[in-house]
Image: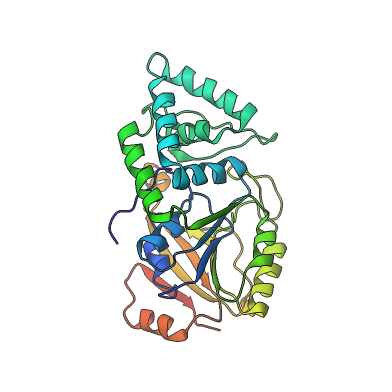
Amino acid sequence: MTSLPHPIQYQGSKRNLASNILKFLPNKIERFIEPFAGTGAVSIAVAAQHISQTFWLNDFNKPLIQLLELIIERPNEIADAYTYIWNEQHQDSVGHYFEVRKVFNKTNDPKLFLYLLARCVKGAVRYNSEGLFNQSPDKRRKGTQPQKMKKNIEGVSHLLKGKCKFTCWDYKQVLAYVKSTDFVYLDPPYQGVCGEKDSRYFCGIYFNDLVLAVEQLNHRGVAFAISYDGKRGEKTFGSKLPEDLGLKRIEIEVGRSSQATLLGRAEITVESLYLSPGLPLTELESYISKAPKQMELSQKYG
């Protein structure tokens, strides 16, 4: 897959895994739904491959989904706003960042959010106990250059404009409205899934709630894929989904952990992809026969 446009370099985004995820999707989908859309990386890839022409992008983080809607539906407006905010930082870029962050936490203006995401450390969203964005600026760089940002925004808009529904709902509300002809891609946070506060996510989810939601999708015959647990070296993240759900579990190698490399350890990051029982087995069997080395089927289809 050729390089795809991504205005938001968001930690946890599936932009680097999207092409691998698409290998397990049907060739044609009536409507593609992301209840945990984030930056919409998988939807962008689906649109680029002409797999679906209709999308539902949802995220409980309201400024984030509002930003995504601006990028897709009003690209010139958000590109111009970003250029203006970016250019204002020349005298004191660090001080400017903190001032923008302060105003954003009062207003939740998605235009300010784009600048913060482009400039913050490692593109990593962090919130304090009061739900306020508190990530620091990357002092080595000033964020994406406006012309590059504009090009990426226009690229995403070209792929998705006029094709999307945008909501800021709890994921369970979204799943209540999905149809058997839809395909659902779930990318829930797997840290803090027992309800413990995790500063990387706007809102955590409960593991048991997710399992129940997956059971209901199975019962209704809705096709889906879930990115969930993972590991880095010997350290695991998140609990595996129960085997009695009958899901097919694939382990996808993401690559070397940059943090581990800095510490002198050659650790590989691996993420799990779960596939619903309703997906055609021929697709999975075809994959198994010619699987690239970076992927591994860790559990035979149930």
Using the rendered view, name the quadrant where residue 92 is placed: top left
Name the residue at the front extreme: 162
Is residue 26 depicted above or below 10 in this figure? Answer: below
Q: Residue at x 36, y 34 (%)?
A: 144
Q: Residue at x 55, y 71 (%)?
A: 182
Where's residue 207, x and y in %? 68, 61
Split into 4 quadrants, where in the image is the C terminus? bottom right
Q: Residue at x 55, y 81 (%)?
A: 278
Split into 4 quadrants, where in the image is the N terminus? bottom left
Q: Residue at x 56, y 43 (%)?
A: 66
Where's residue 106, x and y in %? 64, 27
Is residue 203 depicted above or below 221 in this figure? Answer: above
Is residue 189 depicted above or below 19 in this figure? Answer: above
Name the residue at the left extreme: 2
Where's residue 240, x and y in %? 59, 67
Foreground of the two, 283 or 249: 283
Where's residue 76, x and y in %? 40, 37
Work out whether residue 10 can be spotted: no
Q: In the shown orientation, is residue 41 left or right of residue 228?
A: left
Instruction: Report the label total.
Output: 0
